[in-house]
Structure formats: structure tokens, C-alpha cells
Amino acid sequence: MKNLILSFLLAVSFAALAQDTATSEFLHTQGQKIVDKSGENVLLRGIGLGGHMLQEGYMLKVPFSGQQYVIREHIEELIGKEKTDEFYEAWLQNHTRKIDIDSMKSWGFNSVRLPMHYNLYTLPVEDEPVKGENTWLEKGFQMTDSLLSWAEANEMYLILDMHAAPGGQGHDVNISDRDPSKPSLWESEANQQKLVALWKKLAERYKDEPWIGAYDVINEPNWTFEEGKNKNGIQDTLNAPLKKLLVDITKAIREVDTNHIVIIEGNGWGNNYNGILPPWDDNMVISFHKYWNYNDTASIQQFIDFRKKYNAPVWLGETGENSNVWFTDAIRLMEENNIGWAWWPLKKLGFNNPLEVLVNPGYQQILDYWEGEAEKPSEEEAYKAFMQLAENTKLENNYFHRGVVDAMIRQPHSREVIPFTEVVVDNSAVIKAANYDMGEAGKAYHDSISANYYISTGGERQSWNNGRTYRNDGVDIYPNESRESYDDVYVGDMEEGEWMQYTFSVSENGIFDLSFKTAADASGKAAVEVGGKRYPAFVVPDSAEKWIETTVKDIPLKKGQNRIKFFVIDGGFKLEQIKINRQK
């Protein structure tokens, strides 16, 4: 009874502090919705800046434990502390700049989630000169100020996300840069007090900033508080220490800031709310994270139920790391249910995000060395490679995956298929095999595997693009052996029943020949459909893996838009390009 009374008093207290949000300039909750200053529904469409303030090992393709402090130790072993500091300073300057936020706005996003590392804002507990006090570092605050100014210039909301809390908030150590040899957030009262103080400091600084969208106070806690349960907290039934800390943080924020939304996350990577709800503040949003499961109503029903039961908004605070098919289906599901979302991440060394940081040859040598497959580079070579990697994080040096953005912004609302690149045929033209149309599976292409659903299926993770490069659909794309540019690729792993469609324009009616550049170590069979007409199948010859051309003659093409569908009847071959030549 005492706990119930305390919870009631806290709810009343926090609600009173948040009363004025209903008429404020700030995003705030209104029943089950997030609304703006005019009371209009706001559907947050955002991306998280993973890898910016906090690196995770998979984003840098390292073959060892992926905490940032471990990565840093390995870099120091190669180039020393001073040059490592220089690399990290360049990384922080280059990774996210105004051009990135401007671009996100132009693509159609309206919000940014900033995964913060606490050590850019304050010293670790063990490094404090005076025990129990907090040394504030300007670096993190200045970076946040700059990001806020860029967001405000674009009328985008900046959501502050405590991604790496003092001590680390879970057993999934990469997420929070946790050092298991030191007390975690949950094993140290000093770490908890530092986190509370940091949130109060952030709230003091940004309390009057309307383009700060919300405070996401602890990212993905994953820690059991109950003996005999899964260590990541997915089975906990009470979550009492997590609830207490969330309440303490909310109270500290509300002492100085009654304007901003507070976002909470459950245990077990954000989704276990046992013992945590109901919300204790009238300006609070319930967040959940969603990865590698089916995109059906059942997958989010729990949070739809929470929204109705507690009359509070829900928000998909983190998701991604899958195929374009999965992205489109997930966003369509969210938006049909008026649930905002934030994708993960904007960029990394990998293909399934809007921007890809390209691997320079020197850094590849370092990765090979760390794998035990290459000689140790010299300090000079390694330093040059790391500084080039930092330079490659700049947007203008990234590869822009427009198909990923198309899958997130256009395709959830349109089933139209559009060209990946504009091709106009006068007398001749070449279409890269990997430049098939953009659109949903079954309309732009068909592949046997189009997404990873291993959480729902209980099976192993599946790769939808086995080559893991260039595009993010089910089509398997590989780099050519002597890759001279990022788009020097071919389509491989062809299987029976798969197909790709290519849309292009022709300047004048005519009869054309289609030549297909293929390579195979056993003969296969394919067919084409043009203008809705299916032509007889043709043999793809065994070429001992050398590139050859097979031509289909006498294909009429009309002036204006045309479409070719390439069908795999008997697979096992590679396709690099299609040549279109007007007959003389």
C-alpha cells in the first residue's frame, strides 16, 4: 500500500510540473499522440546517429570485442596515444556535420536521435578528482549545441538519447562501451548519481529549446535484477532498480525543465516493461525497439495495448539493420498505427543504411592484420589509414544508398516502381545488372530471400544480399574481382524463379538487340519479357567463369518508357550488364 501511495504522489507531482506543456512551444503529449505547439499530430520520422559519439565494433568491422574503449586500445597499439587522440578528434568533427542534417531534411526526415556517450559530457566516476563531484566537459555540450543549431535551421527535432550511461547499462557491452572489469550502472550508486546529475545538467541547458524533441533517458537497459533469470533482463518481472532510476531521472529533469517529453525504455533492450508502467509523468512517451521480426500487428500489439491502457504515446525509438523490404514493411506498419520511428543508423562501414563509410585499402590491411591474415602495418601506414577513415566519414565521401532512403520515405506510401538510374536509349545504351528498378519485392524484382526474420522464425540470421554491397534488396550483388569503383559489381547467386526489372526510355521506335554479359561454370537458362511479351528462353553458356555476351535479337522497343524483365529459369550464373543496340 505504501508503494502504491508513493507512486500516486509521484504521478500527481510530475503531472503538475508538466501542466503547462499543453500550450507550450514544445513537442508534448496529448493523450495517445505526440503533438506540436498547435496541437497537431506529429509523426516522428528520424534516424539515429550511431557511430558518431559512440562507436560499436560492427560499425567498424573489427574482429574483436566491440566496445569503443577496446577499439581505441587496439588503435593505440598501432599508432600511439597522441595520434589516436588526433584520429578520434577528426572522427568527431567529420562524422556528423550540418551537411548531414541538411541532407536528412531534404530526403524527408523530420527528427534526429543523438546517441550520447556520457564521457564527452563528464568524467567517469573513477577519474573524478573529488569523489562524489561531477566535472563537466564542454566537448559533448558543444557538439550537442552545434547539432541542435543545424536541426533548428531545418525545423527538425533533436532527441537526446543516453546511449552510453556511466558504468554501462547492460550485459550487451558494445552498446554502452561497458568495461566489465568496473562496476556497471546497476552495481554503483555513484554511477547512478552521475547519470541523474548529467540529465539534470542537460535539462538545465536545453530547457528553453523547442527543437529539442525529447529526452530518451536510458537506451536499451539489458540487465537482470532477479536471480535465475536471463542475464539481459528479458524475463524480469519487477525491474525495481530500473523503475527507481527512471523515476529519479525524471524527478531531476522536472526540477529544472517542465517543457520536454521524457522517453522511457524497458529492460531487455527496451521492451520489457514489467513493473515499470504506468507512466508517472503526464509528458512521457513509452519507447520500444524492433529488430529482425515479422512486420505484422502482432509484433507491436503489446505497445498498442500500452498506448490505449495508459493513454500515452508510444514511439519506435530504434530499428533497422535489415533489408529494404523489411524497412518499407516496418514503416508502413508504424505509420498506419500513428507510431513515429527512428532508424539505426545514418551511416557506418556497411551497406544497409542511407550512407556508407567506404573502407580504404590501408584500413582493410589493418582489419586483415587484426584478423591475423596480414603483416602489422608500420605506424606511419596505420596513421595514414586511420586518418583517411576519419576523412571518409564525411558525407561527401560516403556512398549514398538512395534505394534505402526510397524504401523508407517513398515506398511505404507508394507501390509505384521507378528506375534506379535514368537510362535513355538513342542507338545504344548499357544498363548495369545491379541497377534494376526501385520498388517493393514482387514488383521491381523477385528474390528467394528478401529480409531477415530470425527472431520470429527462431532460425539463424539470413543474408538477403549475399554480397553485402551496393544495394539493400534481396538481389545478391558482388564486387568484381578488380573493383575499380563502388558500382563495379555484378548480380550473382541466381536461382530459379528470380527476376529483375529495368525501366528505361527510348528516343525513337525501333528494333533492337539485347546482349547479356554473363559468366558461368555450368550452363544456365534465362528469358526476357519486354512490353509484356515473354520471349523464348535462351541458354546462358558455360564460360569457365569468364565474361561473355549472349544476344537476343529482334526486340521491338517503342518511343518513350520501356521495361525489360530478366527471368532466371536455370540459375547458377552471374549477370553484369545488359547492352541495348538499335539494329541498323
Image (cartoon, rainbow, N blue to C red):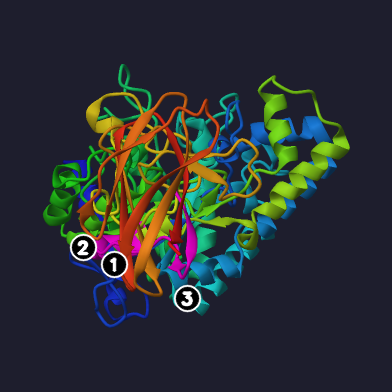
Nearest to viewer (mark 2 / mark 3): 2
Q: Position of residue 131 (x, y in %)?
A: 66, 41
Q: Position of residue 322 (x, y in %)?
A: 37, 43
Q: Quadrant of residue 94?
A: bottom right
Residue bearing the label numbered 2: 338
Amino acid type for the residue under numbered disc 3: Asp
- Residue 23 vs residue 240, the one in the foreground: 23
Q: Position of residue 270 (x, y in %)?
A: 34, 42
Residue appearing at x 60%, y 25% in the figure: 64
Find numbered disc 2 in the image and state the secondary structure of the residue it sits on.
Answer: loop
Dot 3 crowding, Cα within 10 Å, few <14, some 14–19, many 20+: some
Instruction: In the rendered structure, find residue 208 and report the number of the disc placed on it.
Output: 3
- Residue 240 vs residue 512, the one in the foreground: 512
Find numbered disc 3 in the image and state the secondary structure of the residue it sits on.
Answer: loop
- Residue 180 vs residue 516, the one in the foreground: 516
Instruction: In the rendered structure, find residue 43 and report the number of the disc placed on it.
Output: 1
On the rendered image, what quadrant is the N terminus found in?
top left
Left or right of 575: which side holds 364?
Answer: right
The answer to whether residue 75 of the structure is visible from this angle is yes
Dot 2 crowding, Cα within 10 Å, few <14, some 14–19, many 20+: some
Vertical comparison of 316 with 164: above or below: below
Find numbered disc 1 in the image and state the secondary structure of the residue it sits on.
Answer: loop
Vertical comparison of 244 with 540: above or below: below
Tell me which label, 2 or 3, sits earlier in the chain.
3
- Residue 520 vs residue 94, the one in the foreground: 520
Nearest to viewer (mark 1 / mark 3): 1
Q: Position of residue 42 (x, y in %)?
A: 28, 71
Q: Is residue 412 one of those drawn in magenta?
A: yes
Q: Are marks 2 and 1 in contact (CB under 8 Å)?
A: yes
- For the record, the magenta segment spans 407-433
The answer to whether residue 450 of the structure is visible from this angle is no
